[in-house]
Image: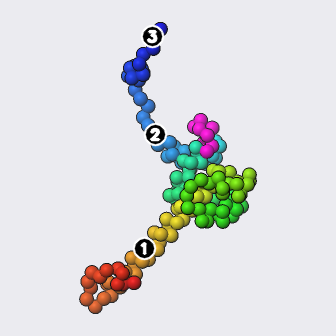
Amino acid sequence: MKKMPKRERKQVSGERKPKIDTKAESFKLFTEGKTVSEIAKTRNLSIQTIETHLSYYVSTGDINIEKLVSREKILLIEPAIKNFEGGAITPIKEKLGNDVGFGEIRLMLAWQQYQNGLKKTISFYFMNETILSRISYAPHPQIVPASKLI
C-alpha cells in the first residue's frame, strides 16, 4: 500500500479541531478546584506543563501564590530568588535542595514578577499624582518638564 503525501492526508482527514488556549484551559480547571496533578492527569499533560501554565496566571496576579506553594516553602524560596536577574534556575535549586521543586521556584519567580510590576505601577501612579497636583496648583498652569517638578 502506497502512503499518501502528508498534505493530502491532512485534507482527507476532514475538519481540524479548533485550537484552544491551553493555559486558559488549565486555569479554568484550577479555578474549579482541581489540583495541579489532577489537571495534569485530566489533560494528559505533565505536572511541569500545568505549573508553567499556572505560573502565567500567578505573574498576572490572577492566582495567589499561596494557592500553589505552601507558606513554609515561600519563606524558604523568597530569599533565594530575591536578587535573581534571569538565566538558569539550577543554582537556586541546588542551593535550596531536594525539598523544593523547579516548578515551585518558577511559580515563585512568576509571583516576584507580579509583585515587582505592581510596585512599579504604584510608584508610577504616585509619581504622576505628584506631578499632576503640582501642575494644578501652579498659579498659571502650563506644561512644565517633569524634571523641573521633582
- Which of disc 2 and disc 3 is earlier in sequence? 3
**Nearest the camera: 136 or 96?**
96
Location of mark 1 (residue): 125
- Quadrant assignment, res 142: bottom left
Outermost residue on the bottom side: it is 139
The amino acid sitting under disc 3 is: Lys
The magenta segment is 39-48
Is residue 56 located in the magenta-colored stretch of the structure? no
The amino acid sitting under disc 1 is: Tyr
Instruction: Give residue 90's position: percent from left, percent from top.
Output: 65, 52
Task: State how the image is colored.
Answer: rainbow
Q: Main secondary structure of the magenta part?
A: helix
**Can residue 29 be seen by looking at this rendering?**
no
Q: Secondary structure at mark 3?
A: loop
**Nearest the camera: 146 or 56?**
146
Instruction: Give residue 119's position: percent from left, percent from top.
Output: 50, 70
Location of mark 2 (residue): 20
Instruction: Give residue 59's position: percent from left, percent from top.
Output: 53, 57
Left or right: 146, with 93 as reference point: left
- Which of disc 2 and disc 1 is earlier in sequence? 2
Against 105, is 150 above or below? below
Location of mark 3 (residue): 2
